[in-house]
Image (cartoon, rainbow, N blue to C red):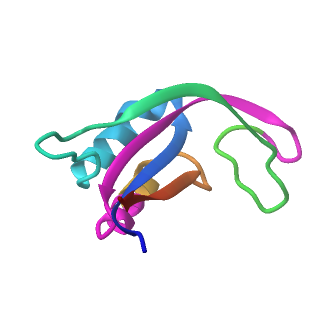
Amino acid sequence: MYTFKRVKVCVFVPQENEEEIRLAISNAGGGVIGNYRSCSFVTKGMGWFEPQKGATPTIGKLSQLESVLEVKIEFECDYTTVKDIVNKIKQSHPYEEVPIDIFPLLDI
């Protein structure tokens, strides 16, 4: 049976908000690996979305397909701190719906 103590978190954010979100992650305790802190990996890409009725988009208009140059910030953290870190990300993130993926890192 596999267990895990750490998770990898990926968050997608407009490129111009990258530094603010990386700082929020670091200040909340994310990105600590051994004796290193503020560890992350960033890749650029294009995010696509179409706001629907009831949405209040930061970017774009209702019922119109929109694209935004985004970055994906990946980092690790202890599974016991991930909820607090995600809450800090949400407080700093410009989007109404924050795209976050969380993956367990198996102890093998």
The spot of residue 61 in percent (x, y) is 80, 41
Residue 64 lies left or right of residue 33; in this view the side is: right
Residue 15 lies left or right of residue 40; in this view the side is: right
Instruction: Give the answer, above or below, for where 100 lies relative to 39.
Output: below
- Does the magenta-highlighted stretch encompass residue 37? no
Instruction: Give the answer, above or below, for where 88 lies relative to 18.
Output: below
Which residue sits at x=34%, y=39%?
22
- Does the magenta-highlighted stretch encompass residue 82? yes
The spot of residue 17 in percent (x, y) is 45, 34
For the image, the number of numbered tags is 0
Which residue sits at x=27%, y=37%?
39
Q: Which of these two is toward me, 41 or 96?
A: 41
Residue 1 lies left or right of residue 53; in this view the side is: left
Q: Which of these two is toward me, 2 or 63?
A: 2
Quarter of the picture holding the C terminus: bottom left
Q: Residue 49 occupies which quadrant of the picture?
A: top right
The spot of residue 67 in percent (x, y) is 74, 31
Highlighted range, magenta: 61-87
Which residue sits at x=45%, y=38%?
73
Q: Residue furthest right?
A: 63
